[in-house]
Amino acid sequence: MKSFEFHNTRSLVVERGGAAKLHERIAAMGCSSVLIVTDPGLLAAGVLEGALAGLANHGLRATVFSDVQADPPEHVILAAVAAARTAEVDCVVGFGGGSSMDAAKLAALLACSGEQIAEVYGVNQAKGPRLPLILVPTTAGTGSEVTPISIVTTGVGEKKGVVSPVLLPDVALLDAELTLGLPSQVTAATGIDAMVHAVEAFTSKRLKNPISDCLSREALSLLSGSIRRACVDGGDLEAREHMLIGACLAGMAFANAPVAAVHALAYPIGARFHVPHGLSNSLVLAPVIRFNMVSAAGQYAELAPIVMPRATGSEHQKAQALAKYLGDLAGDLGLPTRLRDVGISDLDVNLLACDAMKQTRLLINNPRELGFDDAVSLYQEAL
């Protein structure tokens, strides 16, 4: 076995109703003034009310920054940093989906370290220190609460990542009650996103390790066993909790065995056409699996029985069955299944492929080398 390192969030709390006790976590860290980073929809829906009431009742000062957008651009990150500095906070809480948590990570870093955002893009460029950080996911998808990664939209069609262990939070709080009633399509898209994380971590060419493999398998089991229930009945608390834990495990897996071509092809779709990240992944997932079979059929075949217990046949047949299952899942759950369904045409393919080739941080992890012509073919297959 090759030597490897495994980085993880320091403390993971799984507690129904735990968000209302957020003040206890903050006080235990010796903090008294907190910046809560979230999005306007969550704030308007009252999802933060329990947490905010607990903070106020226990004498902790809260400043809410609620301007986070999906796939946050640089100016949103810098506005959150400015809010943290103006309020002189000593703690940051990311409350929401992946975009809010990613923005919170960078706000905690840049408000404290004095680093410039342009200096920290890439792997291990961010040095810190950062402010104490708590992340509270409200969707079961990105696993951002346990990853050392923040993704920022840096221009039309381009996203960049900040990847550094300093971004791992002090506490990840999983409260399934926060995800009750999440719309079915959001549940489906974020859930498939988490499944992609598990699949890509398991088949990652670079930094693959046995701990990530175990986490990927368990994540895929929890997610595939609960996603339909969670979509059909938004109030199924057990299914919601299984989804949240599954997404978290998948996040731990890919934080250490990085994702690859599915994400590389998905990022330009989200950046240029404003397609939600989970749906962008879903649209290219099956074509990428079929492309990778030359190099990873055995690994895909190993995952197939987890989502399809009765899967039989050769390695190739089981791998093909996995691709079909995951390709059909989006349609079964009411999501678009083709790029043309989200406004992408054949005229856009070359531009998307050019953008995907810039994602070298991801492409080096793919089990099969993927070039520009391959990307064009995969986008065309997904049309």
Image (cartoon, rainbow, N blue to C red):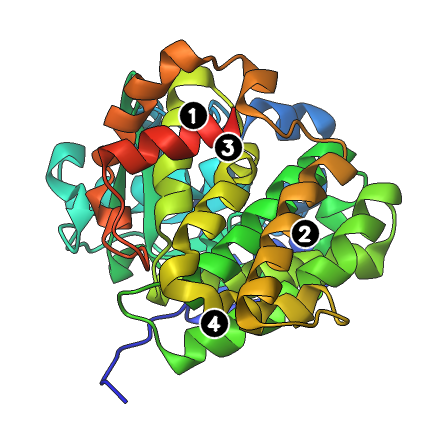
Q: Which is more N-terminal, label 2 or label 4?
A: 4
For numbered disc 4, what is the local secondary structure? helix
Q: Residues within 10 Å of mark 3 (few under 14, many from 20)?
A: many
Seen at 47% across and 24% down, the residue is 69
Percent from the top left, x then y, of residue 103? 39, 37
Callout 3 touching callout 1 (CB < 8 Å): yes
Number of the label disc, if any, that sits on residue 280: 3
Is 149 located above or below residue 224 in the figure? above
Q: 147 and 184: which one is in front?
A: 184
Seen at 64% across and 58% down, the residue is 321
Q: Residue flagged by tag 3: what amino acid is it? A: Ser
Q: Residue flagged by tag 1: what amino acid is it? A: Ile
**Residue 33 seen in this snapshot:** no
For numbered disc 3, what is the local secondary structure? helix
Query: How far apart are labels 3 and 1 at the CA level?
Result: 6 Å
* Displayed quadrant of residue 75: top left
Q: 209 and 144: which one is in front?
A: 209
- Give the side of residue 329 with respect to residue 134, left or right: right
Would you name the residue on which mark 1 appears?
A: 269
Callout 3 touching callout 4 (CB < 8 Å): no
Q: 125 and 316: which one is in front?
A: 316
Query: How far apart are labels 1 and 4 at the CA level?
Result: 29 Å
Would you name the residue on which mark 2 appears?
A: 325
Q: Which is more N-terminal, label 4 or label 1?
A: 1
Query: How far apart are labels 2 and 3 at the CA level?
Result: 17 Å
- Give the side of residue 188 with respect to residue 40, left or right: right
